Amino acid sequence: MAIKNEQELTQVGNAVQVNGDIIGKTDVRIAGKVHGNVLVDGELVLEKYANIEGDVKCSAALIAGSIKGNVECKGKLFLQDNAQIIGNVKAEQLIINEGAIFQGNCEMTAMLRKGKDK
């Protein structure tokens, strides 16, 4: 997953801690810590040592860090081998690499749509 437009990218550096929600319409790359919800219309990239303690809503996500909270993606949610999610997941597609940790329930929205079309 690649960020589409670097000009419309919000970044939280690895030396930054955010206490509060991140809300926006752009893609977001997080390398630091967020104690709050992340609610973005764009894609989320969570770097290897980054973490979020709060709920996440986005269009798609590439997770290498950790999330303690529920995650909702309109598209693909990709967990790299060192990713960790403790919380429920709702996504069109969930891709989990070997070594990733996911503890919670998962709802696959694409499968629900396909079932309704029959």
Image (cartoon, helix red, strand yellow):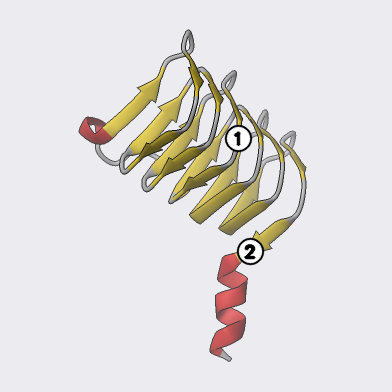
Q: Quadrant of residue 82?
A: top right
Q: Which residue sits furthest right?
A: 103
Give the residue type at disc 2: Met
* Lateral position of residue 113 relative to residue 39, left or right: right
Taking depth in this image into account, of 54 and 100 the one nearest to the observer is 54
Dot 1 lies on which element? loop
Count of marks placed on residues? 2
Q: Quadrant of residue 85?
A: top right
Q: Position of residue 111 (x, y in %)?
A: 61, 72
In the rendered structure, find residue 104 and report the number of the disc placed on it. none
Residue name at image x 57 percent, y 79 percent: 114
Dot 2 lies on which element? strand
Residue name at image x 61 percent, y 27 percent: 65
- Earlier-in-chain disc, 2 versus 1: 1
Residue carrying label 2: 108
Tell me the quadrant of the picture where the C terminus can be found: bottom right
* Lateral position of residue 93 relative to residue 81, left or right: left
Taking depth in this image into account, of 15 and 63 the one nearest to the observer is 15
9 to 103, vertically: above or below: above
Q: Position of residue 105 (x, y in %)?
A: 75, 54
* Lateral position of residue 37 relative to residue 67, left or right: left
14 to 43, vertically: above or below: above
Residue name at image x 56 percent, y 21 percent: 50
Taking depth in this image into account, of 37 and 58 the one nearest to the observer is 37
Residue carrying label 1: 54
Q: How far apart in space, not on screen, are marks 2 and 1 (Cα)?
A: 21 Å
Q: Which residue sits furthest front?
A: 20
Q: Position of residue 10 (x, y in %)?
A: 33, 28
Residue name at image x 71 percent, y 43 percent: 87
